[in-house]
């Protein structure tokens, strides 16, 4: 079952470090197999806690903001995946219980076996910036960037990938943003709204989360 995220930034950062250590401290672009051409059988997806991308260099204040963003993405994932029996959340505590010293693929396999899944969803946050101003007048807009990658535990191959990267732009600066701006009531949204919309849109497009994606 989904559990509520840890509120204190310090504690949350500690948990993020545990998860990052488990993942081997590698960025998405390093040591990951190319995306598979077609769908592969997936019976269950284990969702890992969101972590700060290890190649992002920030100060302590920015790191604390990214930790808040990671917690919010975790909550958005929980809301969008609630009620799906084939999706199971893995807590940072559970990850800490997985034996250390194994390589990344071995760790993924061990984790998948422990929760009864054959695929793992990893998410990294890279940017999390709140808007400076109000709904109709701002100094700087909200901005967020994070990546989601679904890994087949048996092979370590990425079978699905999505990247959410948006800094809200005005319609005057970008006419292509008209439809999105209209859906937002032509307002400057908060970073929380950007996150929730980004997670929702990414998961809707994931073939492994559609009826035909997960095998019975």
Image (tube, grey):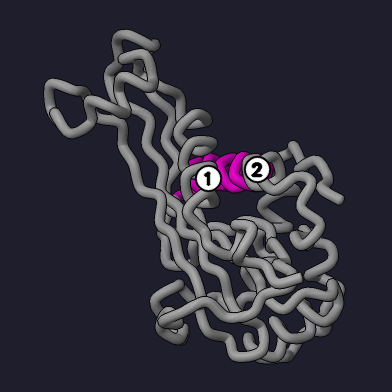
Image vertical order of residue 183 relative to residue 107, above or below: above
Task: Determine the secondary structure under disc 1.
Answer: helix
Question: Percent x, y for residue 115?
Answer: 84, 72
Q: Is residue 160 left or right of residue 74?
A: left
Q: Residue at horizontal 82%, vertical 48%?
A: 2
Task: Determine the secondary structure under disc 2.
Answer: helix
- Residue 75 lies in what quarter of the image? top right
Cα distance in 3D space between marks 2 and 1 = 8 Å
Who is closer to the viewer here, 8 or 195? Answer: 195
How packed mark 2 is, by other alpha carbons closer than 10 Å (few <14, some 14-19, many 20 or more), is some
Who is closer to the viewer here, 184 or 56? Answer: 184
Magenta region, mostly helix, strand or loop?
helix
Q: Which residue is mark 1?
A: 199
Q: Which residue is mark 2?
A: 80
- CB contact under 8 Å: marks 2 and 1: yes
> Which dot marks residue 175?
none
How packed mark 1 is, by other alpha carbons closer than 10 Å (few <14, some 14-19, many 20 or more), is many
Q: Residue at horizontal 53%, vertical 62%?
A: 207
Question: Percent x, y for residue 182?
Answer: 31, 19
Q: Residue at horizontal 55%, vertical 75%?
A: 25
Q: Is residue 65 left or right of residue 215?
A: left
Question: Percent x, y for residue 141?
Answer: 32, 27
Please indicate, yes or no, whether residue 29 appears anywhere in the rendered image. Answer: yes
Numbered range of the magenta stretch: 59-75
Q: Quadrant of the C terminus?
A: bottom right
Question: Percent x, y for residue 184?
Answer: 39, 20
Q: Is residue 27 left or right of residue 97?
A: left
């Amino acid at each position: 079952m989904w559990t509520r995220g840890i509120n204190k930034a310090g504690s949350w950062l500690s948990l993020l470090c545990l998860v990052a250590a488990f993942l081997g401290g590698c960025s998405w672009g390093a040591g990951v197999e190319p995306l598979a051409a077609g769908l592969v059988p997936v019976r269950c997806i284990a969702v890992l806690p969101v972590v700060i991308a290890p190649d992002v260099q920030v100060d302590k204040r920015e790191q604390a903001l990214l930790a808040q963003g990671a917690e919010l993405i975790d909550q958005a994932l929980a809301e969008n995946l609630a009620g799906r029996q084939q999706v199971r959340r893995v807590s940072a505590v559970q990850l800490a219980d997985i034996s250390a010293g194994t390589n990344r693929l071995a760790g993924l396999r061990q984790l998948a076996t422990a929760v009864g899944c054959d695929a793992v969803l990893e998410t990294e946050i890279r940017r999390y910036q709140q808007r400076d101003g109000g709904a109709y007048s701002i100094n700087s807009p909200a901005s967020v960037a994070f990546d989601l990658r679904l890994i087949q535990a048996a092979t370590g191959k990425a079978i699905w990938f999505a990247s959410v990267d948006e800094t809200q732009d005005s319609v005057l600066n970008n006419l292509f943003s008209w439809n999105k701006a209209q859906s937002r009531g032509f307002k400057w949204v908060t970073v929380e709204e950007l996150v929730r919309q980004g997670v929702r849109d990414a998961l809707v497009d994931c073939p492994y989360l559609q009826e035909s994606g997960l095998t019975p």
